[in-house]
Amino acid sequence: MPDYDYDFIVLGGGSGGVRASRMAASFGARTALVEGGRLGGTCVNVGCVPKKLLSYGSHYAEDLEDMKGFGWSIEGTPTFDWATLKARKDAEITRLNGVYASILDNVDVEVVEGWGVLDGAHTVRVGDHRLTGRYILLAVGGTPWRPGSDLLPGVEHTWVSDDIFEMPELPRRVIVVGGGYIASEMASILHGFGADVRLVCRGDTLLRGFDDDIRHELGNELRKRGLHLHFGCHLTRVDKQADGSLQARLSDDTTPEVDAILMATGRVPRTKGIGLEAVGVQADEFGAIQVNDAFQTSVPHIYAVGDVINRLQLTPVALAEGMVVARQLFHNEESKAIDYRFVPTAVFTHPEVGTCGYTEAEARKKFGKIRLYKSSFRPMRHTITKRNARTHMKLVVDDATDQVVGLHIVGPDAGEMTQGFAVAMRCGATKAQFDTTIGIHPTAAEELVTMRTEWVPVPEDHPPRS
Ligand code: FAD
């Protein structure tokens, strides 16, 4: 048997790579982790963590207004200092980078700093350094995508999501291009910090792939808060002006002047130039590595997990996939395919979105006859603040089995609520079981266990209510 430097070489120290290498090493595998950027990857440095910190920060704008309804007042006008928040956010990220380093050090994972390239079936090259491994894991993640200047003249003046975390100062007027969760969240965050935000999206509403009611209601709630949503519209040109501002041209022939344009137009796997072709690892046309249920690529001793395989681009999913690989290779466990149904997810807009399971449209296709339960109400705190905001909830039930197969929420704390209900949904909870669960009063979540009346669409020829 050939002698390798390591049992396991992991390329990429993000969510999937750190988890896989840490577990492999704890099972006794001699493990090296190659990372070209900062430990923790996208999630820790330019994703979930800094995004949620900024989201907390920007929410105070709303809280400061709402507190007046409860009798609170602050003398003078509250001000916000971006430099303070950025410095504190940076300090927290640096702390987390250190936590990751010591977690890896504690189990003797050797961290190799630099960008790795596959250089032979069992070899990874990092600069002049060559490492050999019995198994290799590709966990190189993804990177923001924006069109080239042939498609969008002036694109070089725009930002991608990574840049938001490094902005030297807050822009006053911003265009956010895109309709996915990153565009929606960033638009909400920048608006909360006081920017005048236009969200420009090709689609007819936000969050393609989410339940249609939720997409529609999120748009309404964002509009009520003052965001300008331009649907069915796209950016065609950007010109930088002498004073540094940007003149945008939109497909509706308007030419707004702004201070920044964020292109939140998708992410692509970070596989360019890492040597996939040379060793025969197959990727699709977008660079996503093809794997089987055991996360094995077309080269059997090379594995891939996380955003680079383009299944569900979420941190907990990358962690779960990394654990499957480490367990099957170094803990004699049979590979267990991951069940991607009922993976809960949240969108940290203001208000939040939480979702788990099938949308109404998907459920109709899969189960045929379904039942719907919907509720829309003013959150209790806003009975006092008088803010024009509502919470929207929807349950999708498979009629044949009574199983709750979809849960969708727009409203405060939607993410927290959805995480709890996801456990029940994963266990196959039925609507009858939801109904026999006693609620916690007074909460918004109790509504999910007290929706008794099936929602039926009003026929179009139904006489209007007086
Ligand atoms: P990554 O975390 O991207 O890690 C890949 C690592 O590999 C990086 O550190 C990179 O530097 C390194 N690397 C790449 N190429 C090489 C190479 N050749 N050599 C050495 N190192 C290399 N997910 C959620 O679940 N919740 C959220 O709220 C959420 N918010 C997000 C917000 C934003 C703005 C973004 C961009 C993403 C967000 N995500 C969120 C998605 C989440 O961050 C990713 O799904 C997750 O980080 C994927 O982990 P990964 O290990 O596959 O890749």
Image (spheres, helix red, strand yellow):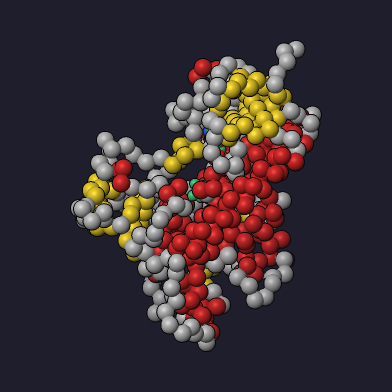
Q: Nearer the viewer, residue 86 or 146?
A: 86
The quarter of the picture where the N terminus appears is top right
The quarter of the picture where the C terminus appears is bottom left
Q: How many marks?
A: 0
Q: In the rendered view, would you say 226 is above or below 336?
A: below
Q: In the rendered view, would you say 209 is above or below 53?
A: above
Q: Nearer the viewer, residue 167 or 265?
A: 167
Seen at 26% across and 54% down, the residue is 244
Seen at 41% across and 76% down, the residue is 465
| Residue lying at the far front of the rendered structure | 128
Seen at 70% across and 24% down, the residue is 6
Q: In the rendered view, would you say 41 is above or below 334?
A: below
Q: Quadrant of ligand 1?
A: top right
Is any atom of residue 393 visible in this view? no
The x and y percentages for residue 324 are 70, 35
Q: In the rendered view, would you say 233 is above or below 79?
A: above
Q: Quadrant of residue 21?
A: top right
Is any atom of residue 151 visible in this view? yes
The x and y percentages for residue 443 are 63, 72
| Residue lying at the far bottom of the rendered structure | 71
The x and y percentages for residue 314 are 57, 45
Position of residue 229 in the picture relative to residue 193 (left or right): left
Position of residue 218 in the picture relative to residue 203 (left or right): right
| Residue lying at the far top of the rendered structure | 1
Q: Quadrant of residue 150?
A: top left
The x and y percentages for residue 461 are 37, 65
